[in-house]
Image (cartoon, coloured by chain):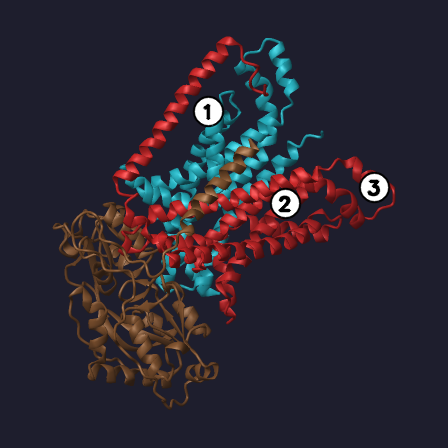
Amino acid sequence: MSVLYDLPGPRARRRNAVIGVLSTAGIAALVAWIVYRFWETGQFEAIKWEQFQYEAVQREILAGLGNTLKAAGLAAVLASLLAVLLAAGRLSDRAVLRAPATTVVEFFRAVPLLILIFFGYYVPLQFGWHIDTLWALVLGLTLYNGAVLAEILRAGINAVPRGQSEAASSLGLRKAQLLRLVLLPQAFRAMLPALVSQFVVLLKDTALGFIVTYPELLWVGKQIGGRLAFDVPYVPAYLVIGAIYVSICGALSVFAWWLRKRLR
Amino acid sequence: MGTFFAVLTDNWHDFARGFGATIRLFLIAGVASLVGGTLLGAMRVSPIPALRAFGATYVNLIRNTPLTLVFAFMVFAVPKLGVNIDYLPSALVALSVYTAAFVCEVVRSGVNTVPNGQAEAARALGMGFGQVLGHVVLPQALRAMVAPMVSVFIAMLKNTTIAAGFSVFEAGAIPEYLSERGENRFAVLVWITIGFLVIIVPLALLQRSMENRLRVVR
Amino acid sequence: MRIKQVAAVVALAALAIAPAACGKEGTPTPSTPGGGGAAPVSDACVDTGLTNTPATPTITGSPTYDKAKTAGKIVIGVKFDQPNLGYKDTQGKRCGFDIEIARLLASKLGFDESKIEYKEIPSANRETEIKGGGIDYYVGTYSITDKRKADVSFAGPYFIAGQDLLVRKDDTAITGKETLQGKKVCSVTGSTPIQRVRDEKLTDAANISEFKTYSECVSQLLDGKTDAVTTDDAILKGYAAQRPDKLKVVGKPFSTEKYGIGLAHDDKALRDFINDTLDAAFKDGTWQKIYDATLGKSGSPATAPPLERY
């Protein structure tokens, strides 16, 4: 029983069963049709999948995955640090800290990541600094995700019942101790789903590295798919790359769920 | 400084066309994903296991896939299915399919914030499904849904830039166009940033004010 | 529900990794596709039989050369996804007309193959990379234009290409730029060829599609979603040479693109040296040998262009 539905009676049960059967049949038919059409247009032809048998190509994919994880890892750490800084600014009692922090957060949330990555690459170049594509990507990701994570932190901390902070300050705890000892531990568990979801977004956003030709996983997929000698197998390449993305992002979510269980 | 403004005025036509396309993509995909996402949300909370499973699979699959990949499927895989679809509609479908998954989650968590007791009481009073939904559940659920929903749409507005890689001329395609004509890359990027700020900051401010007004002390 | 999710993730991961359990050695060589037609040319870079022995030159007054000599390596910007022009196969071997020219120049500058560092630079970043010193010179379908001369300098040209059309093998309707009306054309986003198609109204604006790479355009061509891919004929010939059973280049080139070696703006010493090297290669047949071993495989002939020194 949920908010919208009461326990089903006999008529509802029959109706639900009919709808269930019809929808299962419909979905199965759709999937079957898609697989059939793919097969018909030769997407399962051996030549399109041949590349994947070779070690060289497999190593390419692994290298791409490694690069994706590397960029995501670096960006995650840096973004978290930036987020703590910005959240502290946003939660500060002093308006002189609050105002710039708010502006910074709103600014980076408003600029598309694509443009931020472009900036990350071209701004240093204007000053004659030659920056590696990895750091351009990490810079863009850090700025954007730092702002978003800061917002999540702020919302999480504000969601802790006010009584907690009132009691803590009446005990004589200062703001920093209050944050550290009382608010953060309680806020953390509540924030965890939102935080993890943002990290998953971060991982997926590394796919925008192709803008500066950072050789991450999706870029590798494009290369593999673009090989004319193998009949330009974009569909098989993207299917494999998609499966890898879903696996690692899914693994991240599962890890978060496990973490949540352990913190209970 | 003069050349900085010249970049905008010389290429005003391209900037206008690009951002116009961005806004059009946003509005149409926004409505489509709202409708689709609500339907999906309805599927996920429905009492029919098959629909719940479909909804859950859809959301988990799409949320863990980069948007670029969804676009790529629309443009490269769908033609193989024999469906003849133009590039702008492809972009709209890709954006809608992707954002619908997120809208679904917002709807679902919004509905779940309403305590069960409310609905039970309403049903005990003899209210039908529509009445429970309209008078009891939705008004409370919407309060919780509004802020995250605006976040999802702001994210989608920024995601429209990915369409630039798939033959849709919108704001994200402007850097390549203008740099080929030799314009200063940096200036072009700054103008595009300003364009996006102009569109998004009002939305973000709207979100903040709504968040403050609809806040419920629990 | 969570157990099901974990199971799904594990199954998906297994699916993605399963092929790795059986990994074949060596360079992927496609087998003949089941469907008639000539077998596709292998993806692997074949040995061209061209050898380059490093010379010991004396070049004075070239900051780029001095920097490379001190570093003990030379950094060359190249393309990697243009078959027979600037290509990197799955084993990491590089081949193609531009690559061979790059190798020739490097050896004449005194660097053998092991001292060459190749850097893959996308077209839009060429000027910034050269100006920033990230690469010593660039060889990769780099067209000489006056606008670019404001930022970088060019040695050469070492090849004259022209805009042309790549179509499906069985397409008889398109024979040149005049026959493009009502047909769909594809190229790289914002590139000069597609802007020319737009400016000269060779087809309706609605028929123009643009992607990030030529391979995507070729994919659309093979799928029938577009009717022609347009860019420099050198690039198109490279694709046609890989699948002569499915693709062909038609018509006469309707523009002139002079490919040059991109160098730092003020490095006249290096520019003169490279021009002299190219001149010698034109005269003693080396250039022709390089062409025949790479782009010449598409069947079209070419002659060395006149150098434009400045």
Q: Do marks 1 and 3 share a chain?
A: no
Q: Amino acid at mark 2?
A: Glu
Is residue B65 visible in the rendered image? The answer is no
Q: Do marks 2 and 1 share a chain?
A: no
Q: Is residue C279 above or below residue C202?
A: below
- Residue C236 location, x and y as percent? 23, 60
Q: Amino acid at mark 3?
A: Ala
For chain C, what colour was chosen?
brown
Residues at marks 2 and 3, CA–CA distance in whole angstroms: 23 Å
Judged from the image, the secondary structure of the residue bearing numbered disc 2 is: helix
Which mark is in front, 2 or 3?
A: 3
In the picture of the structure, the residue carrying the numbered disc 3 is A168
Image quadrant in which the C terminus of chain A is located: top right
- Residue C39 location, x and y as percent? 20, 56
Judged from the image, the secondary structure of the residue bearing numbered disc 1 is: helix
In the picture of the structure, the residue carrying the numbered disc 1 is B50
Which chain does tag 2 point to? A
The residue at the far front in this view is C22
Number of numbered markers: 3
Q: Is residue B27 above or below residue A67?
A: above
For chain B, what colour was chosen?
cyan
Residues at marks 1 and 3, CA–CA distance in whole angstroms: 49 Å
In the picture of the structure, the residue carrying the numbered disc 2 is A151
- Crowd around label 1: few <14 · some 14–19 · many ≥20 (10 Å): many
- Crowd around label 3: few <14 · some 14–19 · many ≥20 (10 Å): some
For chain A, what colour was chosen?
red
Residues at marks 2 and 1, CA–CA distance in whole angstroms: 36 Å
Point 35% across, 80% down: residue: C106
Which chain does tag 3 point to? A
